[in-house]
Amino acid sequence: GDSVTQMEGPVTLSEEAFLTINCTYTATGYPSLFWYVQYPGEGLQLLLKATKADDKGSNKGFEATYRKETTSFHLEKGSVQVSDSAVYFCALISNQAGTALIFGKGTTLSVSS
Amino acid sequence: DGGITQSPKYLFRKEGQNVTLSCEQNLNHDAMYWYRQDPGQGLRLIYYSQIVNDFQKGDIAEGYSVSREKKESFPLTVTSAQKNPTAFYLCASKAQGHGYTFGSGTRLTVV
């Protein structure tokens, strides 16, 4: 079935460091792809999305490009801040489960000053 | 304001008891979903419903049941058959052509 694999955490960085969180997917066709973020003690928020190949989603300095040739949607940020500390989830819309989102296991990011 | 309300925020259950988690939305969304979140496991799909009076099993439906008698409500029952029910449960909804809205979750603890 459809699935998402993202890099294991935790990822620990210093402020202003470059961030990459890898995400690859297995699915039929070309599903829409998402990154969600969960800040400590808060709910799930949409960070960015891409709906077709070569689309680039971006928000709050984060970017991810939909690469169909490598079935990937890696999250990047050029300079992280302490306030970026959170859990990041990669997800896709599954054609096998209605319109349900299928999530990766999440990557915890911790940024220190 | 429109949104999803999950209640209660914290729930304690004795072993062997069934418990029902509430999820209500006033967004007029057709589709609703239940997820379970465990540390290191991400969010796993329990059940989903595309329309009133219809629902489908997700990846981890064993030990859970749902109903969808009204468009705005999608309650989840955690039965005694669920071997490890302690977790954080998230409800979500979606309208066609629009994004997903998530509730704030219910943390269930078996004591």
Image: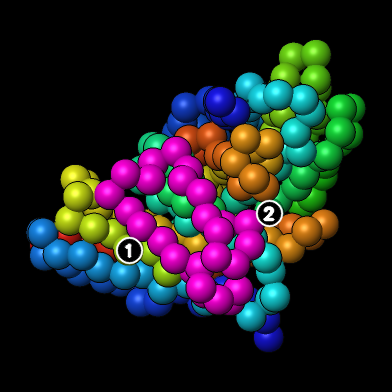
Nearer to us in this view, B32 or B35: B32
Q: Which residue is mark 2?
A: A46
Q: Position of residue A37 (x, y in %)?
A: 60, 50
Q: Is residue B110 magenta?
A: no
**Magenta segment: does it hold B68?**
yes
Q: What residue type is disc 1 on?
A: Thr
Q: Position of residue B105 (x, y in %)?
A: 44, 65
Please tell me whether mark 2 sits on a helix, a strand or a loop: strand
- Left or right of A97: which side holds B46? left
Count of marks overlaid on the render: 2
Chain where mark 2 sits: A
**Residue B11, above or below A19:** below
Give the residue at x 59% y 67%: B52
- As drawn, which residue projects farthest toward the top? A69
The coloring applied to the image is: rainbow
Q: Main secondary structure of the magenta part?
A: loop
Q: Nearer the viewer, mark 1 or mark 2?
A: 1
Give the Cα distance between marks 1 and 2. 27 Å
Query: Which quadrant would residue A45 be assigned to in this image?
Result: bottom right
Numbered disc 1: what chain?
Answer: B
Mark 1 — residue? B77
The crowding category of the residue bearing disc 2, from other C-alpha atoms within 10 Å (few below 14, some 14 to 19, many at least 20), is some
Q: Is residue B107 left or right of residue B46?
A: left
What range of the chain is rendered magenta? B49-74
**Residue A59 visible in the snapshot:** yes
